[in-house]
Amino acid sequence: MTTTYQVRRLGVGRTAIVFAALYLIFGIIFSVLFAMFGALIPREEMGLDAMMFGGMALIIMPLMYAVFGLITGFLVALFYNLIAGMTGGLELELVSAE
């Protein structure tokens, strides 16, 4: 048995928080990957400034991703709500899990 529902509105604050959390996870993953690839560069070619930048990137990059995720989530929800008002929103077809 399937039932069709429409998503008429997204909570702007909740959507922004979910996007921020998702982007934070992506930022952590990407910063670790960048650090691993950066570790492959021979130490003689890197100066102290480059090593400090790499360490700071492990902290700053995930935080920047989270901030951009918060802004993106806010804008996505805001624009979705505007468009859904004109088009009726997304339709979801749900089935019972039984």
Image (cartoon, helix red, strand yellow):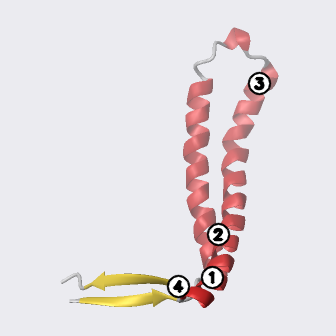
Tell me the number on the disc at residue 83: 1
**SS label for mark 4:** loop
**SS label for mark 3:** helix
**SS label for mark 2:** helix
Label 4 and label 2: CA atoms lie apart by: 17 Å
Label 4 and label 1: CA atoms lie apart by: 7 Å
Label 3 and label 4: CA atoms lie apart by: 48 Å
Give how far across and how far down residue 72 sits, in percent.
Answer: 68, 65
- The residue shown at (55%, 35%) is 33
Ranked by sequence position, the earlier of labels 3 and 2 is 3
Residue placed under numbered mark 3 in the picture = 50
Nearer to us of marks 2 and 1 is: 1
Asked if disc 4 and disc 1 are in contact, CB closer than 8 Å, the reply is no
Q: What residue type is labelled 2?
A: Gly
Residue placed under numbered mark 2 in the picture = 73
Give how far across and how far down residue 8 sits, in percent.
Answer: 54, 89
Up-down relation of residue 5 to residue 56 (above or below)? below
Q: Image quadrant of residue 48?
A: top right
- The residue shown at (72%, 52%) is 64
